[in-house]
Amino acid sequence: MDEINQPITFRQLLSKCPRIEVPLIQRDYAQGRESEKEVRQHFLKALHAALILESGDSGPPLNLDFVYGSMENGASGSFLPLDGQQRLTTLFLLHWYLAWRDDQHSQFKRLLWDGRHARFTYGVRPSSTEFFDELVQYAPDSAPEDVPTLRLMVEDRPWFFSHWRLDPTIQSALVMLEDIHYLFKPTAGLFKRLTNDERPAITFQLLPLEHFGLTDDLYIKMNARGKPLTPFETFKARFEELLIELFPTEKRTLGDGEVSVAEFFERRIDTRWTDFFWAHKNAKTNTFDDLVINLLLALARVSLDPSNPNFNQDTSALGDKQLSGTFALFHERGWLTRGFAENLIVLLEAWSISGGKQAPVLPNSRYFDEAALFLKAIQQPAALDYTELVQFAALVFYLRHHEGNVQPIDLKEWMRVVRNLSANTAIERPEEYGRSLTGLTKLLPHSHRILEYLSTEAVGPIGFSPQQVREEVLKAKLILADAAWRDRIDRAEEHGYFFGQIEFLLDFCGVLAHPEKDPTKWGNTVHANLQTEFDLYLRKAQITFGSSGLALTKPAAGEHLWKRALLAIGDYLLSNGSNSSFLTDPPSNWDSWKRLLRGDDGKRTYLKALWDRLAHDADIEPQLNDVIKSATDLEPWRAIIVGTPEVITYCGLQKIRREVCSEEIYLLNKTQMNGNHAELFSYGLYLDLGKLGVDHELSALASRYYESVSTTDAEPRLVFRPECAGQRLKIAVESSNGQFLVCVSRSELASLPELATALRDDVGLDEQFGTLSRRVLRADIHEVLRQVASTLQKFST
């Protein structure tokens, strides 16, 4: 081999040596591995593109870079590739396939068969050698278009041994052949193009090691061979190529000059952006590749086009925690758009401006915590919820729309509005997320003067809660009409539970009810009076609610004071189907306090009425107890709950069941009737009897318990277990159609006929279906129980 560093074809290499043999020291063929899918497909597409060009095309051939190796036993021996084996193996497989495709197997065999063995083979293990010998001789009878699966066809040959399925080189070769079959099956005439040495389509640079005085061992140590490119390294290289297509003419300023977008990306990703990511590198591996891929996945989620028919599917896919980010995935799904590239560049330019430390664009994290978002994005991009994504998108969109002219104050106001809209809109499904992104796009042209836009324009549907949009419009008008509103609104919005939703305060203080809807026409006195009321209600709101929900009261003062006092004012419970709730804290729950504050059911007026009875500058517990104790003329069910905190405690998830056309109210331990539940009136009676202490008139009924049930086939009930004449009886009281039903099993009285007669005659129990029972008005139940106790006592003495 006299040529050094000269372009050469696969065919020409074979003409200079008797055979090409991948030596024992090399690894198995790897391009067919599943983990190498992206590399494999990219390489095949490059080969395909080079081959389909006409031989007279003026462009240069595809050059596959350097192939290093040495000659075994001097110049007359086999060529042993030490670097480039993967490319050479793929070229061999491509020669075999195209020879079959173009019915040129005889010519292929003359090139690759020496009469005994294949002229391209692997010395890694005997099975690999045997496989290549058989493959070179194999000429399929079927035409390629009649073969759906090439791999299965090969594996089905008599010469294919089953144990070859354990050889990784053979398995990789079969996978590569399958992909070649998929890509090259529609072609014709490419074998001639591939073997054209005068006008070659594909070449490589041959560098024999002996010309440089390198031993195989030294080369292996220097080459650090076998270490594949990371997904990020592959992504970076492929993305640079794609940027040339996405931005064929656009330039970006870099230093004192202008460069193409692709070159800008290439230089930034290897310098300033690398310094930025290096601060977050993996301490064990000293790499940050996975972190960058994760950020790309997060950025893809906010760069999707909601108008794309695949938006929902893509959004769901990117939310999969098992998703592995590769260039092939991004490219095949169409996520590598101009918008994605621009978003990536402006975001990294902004965050990396300080070098190795993230430089927040916002003056503080009040409305959006960039540092927290970044850490979550590089660690768990799929864990970002839709609200976080909308806010992230708002930041990225603003940076992109105002690139070169970002005003921190305007950005802060923009993020405040978006925070309020997104945090107080139910965004739980891809379609809702898409509507929110569309809304951001509509607002974006006005993002540098968002308050002015909201206050003067008729803002239509923009993908967020219409109520929250109306609130933002009203607050914008107030802030611009009178500067004194600014601090008040900010303080209220920053309450940890309200989080931007404060329309209830504007309602309670009188802003919503003002007949003049344009605050600029109110005058200073009107503003001042409304602001005074606003301050008062805000103070009471701060007493009522903590950052996580309803504020706790002192245990010694009583349980559930806020809920009982509010119920004393009115039926504030929110409903969902047959269930009603005493309300819960999590804002996303259907029965949250935030929903009450939104006024969905018009029941927040009860809260205002309660606050109007409370002084903000005095201990709250005594005031709440006064409201509870002074409650009069309440419906029976409200009266029981207001006076009996244990009822609310029983409802573990704060739910009760009020069936249509039913007088009974069930207390749910969880959320459904197939879980333990009690009935309000019978449970209230049970608790009431317990509060009476020792009542000599009821002493015969002192043994009692409450029987909850977990089925609709039986009623919850209060059960008495008195002992009479040496026999333990069971007397039950349950609620039925607005009354109580007192029951005694007739079988239990079989040995006590005189007692049965007394219960009929003295208490008025009637015998029905083997049971002695009586319906009793709720107001009369204590008197009837005394009669039962008195009767029992007569037979116990």
Image (cartoon, rainbow, N blue to C red):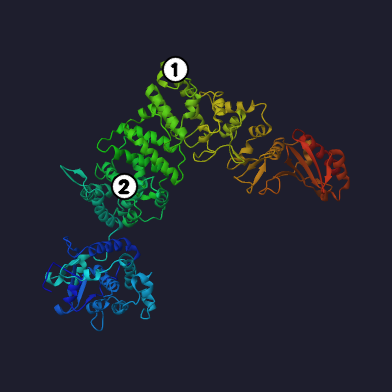
At label 1, which amino acid type do we have? Val
Question: Among all residues in the image, which is located at the extreme left?
Answer: 2
- Observer-side mark, 2 or 1, equals 2
Name the residue located 16 percent from the left edge and 72 percent from the top edge: 215
Residue 624 x %, y %: 58, 28
Q: Secondary structure at mark 2?
A: helix
Q: Is residue 265 left or right of residue 754?
A: left
Q: Which residue is mark 1?
A: 526
Name the residue located 56 percent from the left edge and 25 percent from the top edge: 609
At label 2, which amino acid type do we have? Phe
Q: How many marks?
A: 2
Q: Quadrant of residue 638?
A: top right
| Quarter of the figure with the C terminus | top right
Q: Work out whether residue 560 or residue 431 is closer to the camera in this orientation and state it.
A: 431
Residue 707 x %, y %: 70, 46
Name the residue located 32 percent from the left edge and 36 percent from the top edge: 362
**Which of the numbered marks, if any, corresponds to residue 128?**
none
Q: Using the numbered discs, state the Cα–Cα distance from disc 2 to disc 1 in whole angstroms.
A: 49 Å
Residue 361 can be seen, yes or no: yes
**Which of the numbered marks, if any, corresponds to residue 340?**
2
Residue 304 x %, y %: 36, 47
Whichever of labels 2 and 1 marks the residue nearer the N terminus, that label is: 2
